[in-house]
Image: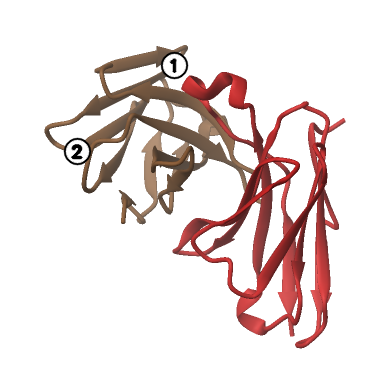
Amino acid sequence: SQKIEQNSEALNIQEGKTATLTCNYTNYSPAYLQWYRQDPGRGPVFLLLIRENEKEKRKERLKVTFDTTLKQSLFHITASQPADSATYLCAREGGGNKLTFGTGTQLKVEL
Amino acid sequence: DADVTQTPRNRITKTGKRIMLECSQTKGHDRMYWYRQDPGLGLRLIYYSFDVKDINKGEISDGYSVSRQAQAKFSLSLESAIPNQTALYFCATSDSKDARNEKLFFGSGTQLSVL
């Protein structure tokens, strides 16, 4: 089965620093990976999609990388703010137009 | 107004009861999904539908059934609820016309507790 692994431990960083979250996958490289943000009591919200043939994708303060050799995607938030505190989910294309989600990493940005 | 609306937001029920969770969407998307989320297990796919006449099992469909009443409506039923079905349930939609960028749009979720 296609698995996605994210660090289950919460990441605490100081405001203004860059947060880096990791997503590792198994088996074959997916056609794309997606990142979502989830706030408590709310549904996940799509942030970014990166394809297998793209090494990096940016959107405002967000950056995602895709390394098919390491079987890994990194998600960066630069100049982090307390409002960035949330759980971030990684998802891989798992065949048949379905997504397989990781368990998410909780990010806390402190003043 | 929310594009993907789930009702109810919270539900407490007893073991053995039949319960239905409803989802409606105004996005005009053809694809709809039901997921459940448990602490430490992440989101897991229960059922999905790519069109009104299309129903497919996900990875954890046992104990659940679905009905796609219209393009905009997709309901999830628990025929005989059991405590380990206590979870946060999400409905999601996607647009097949955007297949190369197929992202999901989620509702706000239904917290179900089975006692």
Q: Colour of chain A?
A: brown
Judging depth in this view, the residue of B85 and A21 nearest the camera is: B85
Residue B65, image x and y in percent?
71, 65
Q: Residue at x 80, y 60 (%)?
A: B21
Direction front: furthest residue: B53
Mark 1, residue position: A61
Q: Nearer the viewer, mark 2 or mark 1?
A: 2
Q: Residue at x 75, y 87 (%)?
A: B15
Residue B32, image x and y in percent?
68, 42
Task: Output the chain of dot 1.
Answer: A
Residue A12, image x and y in percent?
38, 44
Horizontal side, residue A106 vs residue A29: left or right: right
Horizontal side, residue A75 vs residue B24: left or right: left
Mark 2, residue position: A71
Residue type at mark 2 is: Lys
Q: Which chain is red?
A: B
